[in-house]
Amino acid sequence: MFEKILIANRGEIALRIHRACREMGIHTVAVHSTADADAMHVRLADESVCIGPPAARDSYLNIPAILTAAAITGVDAIHPGIGFMSENAQFAEMVEEHGFTFIGPTPEHIRLMGDKVTAKQTVKALGLPTVPGSDGGVPTVEMAAKVAEEIGYPVLIKAAAGGGGKGMKVAQRPEDLVEAYQLARGEALAAFGNDEVYMEKYLTRPRHIEVQLLGDTHGNAVHFGERDCSIQRRHQKVIEEAPSPGLNADERNKIGELAAKVVRDLGYRGVGTIEFLYENGKFYFIEMNTRLQIEHTISEMITGVDLVREQIRVAAGLPLSYKQSEIVFTGHAIECRINAENPDTFTPSPGKVSDFHAPGGLGVRVDSALYDGYRVPPHYDSMIAKLIVHGSNRNECLLRLRRGLEEFVIGGIDTTLPLHRRIISQPDFINGDYDIHWLEGFLGLK
Ligand code: ADP
């Protein structure tokens, strides 16, 4: 097992990884920008190294600085966390070339799934159902028009290098196509430096259902059930729950087994998630994330498995600690992502946290790097806390979530706590009756 791990990330996820390491007896090295010198992950880590100025490209995305910090502190492995370097195949390669273990899949698997066109072709060949659409990239607007005629409107134009919902545009009618196509390509180029796009049928009432997976280097793979991440704004997840209120046990087992088989067939190591849209009883693959996800927490709550611990064990070459039959699902879990943003306008609200009180009690978990007096820097993602609750059934979970949100105090800055309180009191949410467009409808954005 590793003796020392460098955590190449910040915020709550850096803390999450530190906690798993601590419990495994592994020493931690935090890296941080000058803006994060007082951050919680820096305070708690055994050692810390400043890797650059606030801008992420100069610090958390600065490969030479991260590798130098790893060499100076003599770590065995590097955990990339979520975002930043976590899906950068070149980084994974360089980490290994410098003699450290990358806690994640091989660079080949990251590259394969990072290109959404090849990812879709690969999983289709392995037996997963995909959204009807173009066979590969769509390089011209003439071809886009032809594909749209074949699959029927509305259609979605998506960036091959996509992520975070960027470079994605809907064309409701033929008249919208040229503009949507050009906007998607422009946005893709600006966000990813790659303007390749592909096309899919735009599904009008799907749920977003994803399966948590784990594979080892000995040919084993298991699934940890599904998460429903349909409560989204601008294609970004806001609330997630496990299990999904929209699936029955039979559908759950089938999609879990199918996704685990793909991981096994690929010889994939580490944690990963296969995402699907689900409509009218059918699943359609949309992408695979080759890393830990923010919402991994709810799968942990219903299975009792520490996924970060498993991820580290697998990276160290150990076989999985669980057989599929040993992964038992208990109760229900929901996570709210709390952002430092105005809850009505979603304008970021960095600044000093003057009051911080996290809820607690049975079945309540808060993953956050906040503390009283902490200054939320303006340079990074605005998510500042995750409230995760577990109950023996969905109803208990909802009541506990309401209680947890009532108790939560974050003063001095605007947060999306009031938005969460509103969402969870809506009858549609309480009944589990929602799809990926529900939240935008509720917010009056459609
Ligand atoms: P990204 O990599 O940018 O996150 P995804 O392919 O994972 O892109 O899609 C993100 C979200 O966009 C999905 O959760 C869903 O809400 C929406 N979406 C993606 N594909 C479709 C589709 N074919 N029809 C309708 N909505 C879609």
Image: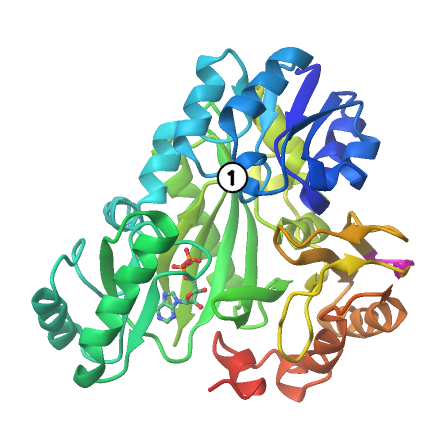
- The quadrant of the picture showing ligand 1 is bottom left
Question: Residue 220: horizontal and vertical position, in percent?
Answer: 48, 30
Q: Is residue 5 magenta?
A: no
Q: Residue 105 at what x, y percent from top left?
A: 46, 31
Magenta stretch, main secondary structure class: loop
Quadrant of the image containing the N terminus: top right
Q: Residues within 10 Å of mark 1 (few under 14, many from 20)?
A: few
Query: Is residue 106 visible in this depiction of the protein?
Result: no
Residue 362 shown in magenta: yes
Kindly identify the amino acid type of the residue bearing the numbered disc 1: Arg
The answer to whether residue 261 is seen in the rendering is: yes
387 and 269: which is toward the camera: 387
Would residue 177 be found to the left or right of residue 96 on screen?
left
Which of these two is toward me, 86 or 311?
A: 86
Q: Which residue is mark 1?
A: 57
In this view, the residue farthest toward the front is 53
Q: Residue at x 62, y 25 (%)?
A: 313
Q: Position of residue 185 (x, y in %)?
A: 26, 60
Disc 1 secondary structure class: helix
Q: Mark 1 vs ligand 1: CB under 8 Å? A: no
Task: Give above or below for 32 relative to 363.
Answer: above
The residue lying at 46 percent from left, 41 percent from top is 290
Q: Is residue 173 left or right of residue 345?
A: left
Q: Which residues are magenta?
A: 356-364
Residue located 23% across and 46% down the image: 125
- What x and y, as percent, mark residue 352? 82, 57
